Amino acid sequence: MKKSILVMTYGSPESYDFDGICEFFTNIRRGKRPNDGEINLLLENYLKIKQSPLQEITKKEVELLREELGEEYSIYFANKFSRPFIPDVIKSMEDDGIEQCICLILEPHYSFYSIMGYERFIKSKKIKFNIIKSWYEEEELINYWVDEIKNILDNNIQNNNYQVIFSAHSVPKIAFKFNDPYVEQVYNMTDMIANKLDLHPDNYVNTWQSESDIGMPWIKPDVLEYLRAQEEHPENYIFVPLSFISEHVEVLFDNDVECKELCEELNVNYHRPPMPNYDPRLIKALVSTVRKHENDKYSFHNPEKSTFNEFEKDGLKMPDFVKEMLAKRNANKNSLNQGNNLEMPEHVKAMLGLNKNN
């Protein structure tokens, strides 16, 4: 049995010029080309950070995984929106005679707007797949953020006059129509980190970032909107973009440029812990994730039956696989005597500006 691990990440522009940005964001928008003004603005943002290091970081992560697991698995790497594309790499795996594949996506939380977007490209008549849905609870990953935040608190902040701003990539509000678990997972991860640090509730908050203009409303509060809305500010803000693991444009620009510039405007000190990148603690978390799931079921994957177009705005109906998933979650909650209602938590309703009649 020839076994493999397919490591996947989002992708990056293949050239930092007008054409490279145009191609990349046209891929992201499922073939819909941004207008020239959008392309030029995006290019300007990338040039401010001197290009994205995501591909180089990811390749290093893959090499370190190969050192740990290469004797048992063939390790492959693919991007969702740039070369090497997922379908092309799967074709290479077929040519290599691979029969089973663990799919390890370098995004810790599951959402229809993240992980499912990868699943749409996973298809083969020759390879059975085991797709890992989330791994945000990995102890080494949690401890990484705890250690790095504590380092800032111990070495850069001399008093209690600070707030930790946990941020995650926003998703469209419509995700909640399908009980998308993403927000719950982000809050769970935040609580795990905050509890280990013994943070007072006044010293941390959850916000969202990096929304894009796709004609759909996104969950709030946006991190920049949150900062502008505060009547008083602490002396220090610590920004923790915990839905990401690597430095790329949504950290280096959205946080290190936009958030930092706003902090300077507000006369507040800006802090951000380094991203995990290829830190040994992250590699341990990834290896642990593989070990926990390597004996899970492998099956031929049919994206037509297990995914849907998450950017469809009109006439979007709940797919059968989502109904089945919710039914299983209901059954699990019943067995734990936690009730059988998957009602959206009140704190999420408040965040979305929903009332009980929505």
Image (spheres, grey):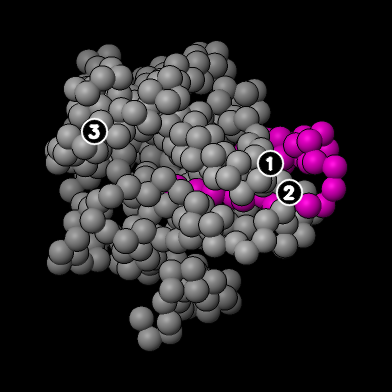
Q: Nearer the viewer, mark 2 or mark 3?
A: 2
As shown in the figure, which amino acid type bears the numbered disc 2?
Answer: Glu
Q: Earlier in the sequence, mark 1 or mark 2?
A: 2
Residue 212: which numbered mark, if any?
none
* Secondary structure at numbered mark 3: helix
Q: Are marks 3 and 1 in contact (CB under 8 Å)?
A: no
Q: Quote the CA–CA distance across marks 2 and 3.
A: 36 Å
User: Residue placed at 41% from the left, 61% from the top?
Assistant: 219
Residue 208 locus on image (x, y percent): 48, 53
The magenta stretch is: 140-169
Q: Is residue 326 magenta?
A: no
Residue at which label 1 appears: 269
Tell me, yes or no, if residue 309 can be seen here.
yes
Q: Is residue 153 magenta?
A: yes
Q: Is residue 171 above or below residue 42?
A: below
Residue 313 locus on image (x, y percent): 19, 60
Q: Quote the CA–CA distance across marks 1 and 2.
A: 6 Å
As shown in the figure, which amino acid type bears the numbered disc 3?
Answer: Ile
Residue at which label 2 appears: 235
Q: Is residue 45 above or below residue 315?
A: above
Q: Earlier in the sequence, mark 2 or mark 3?
A: 3
- Quadrant containing the C terminus is bottom left
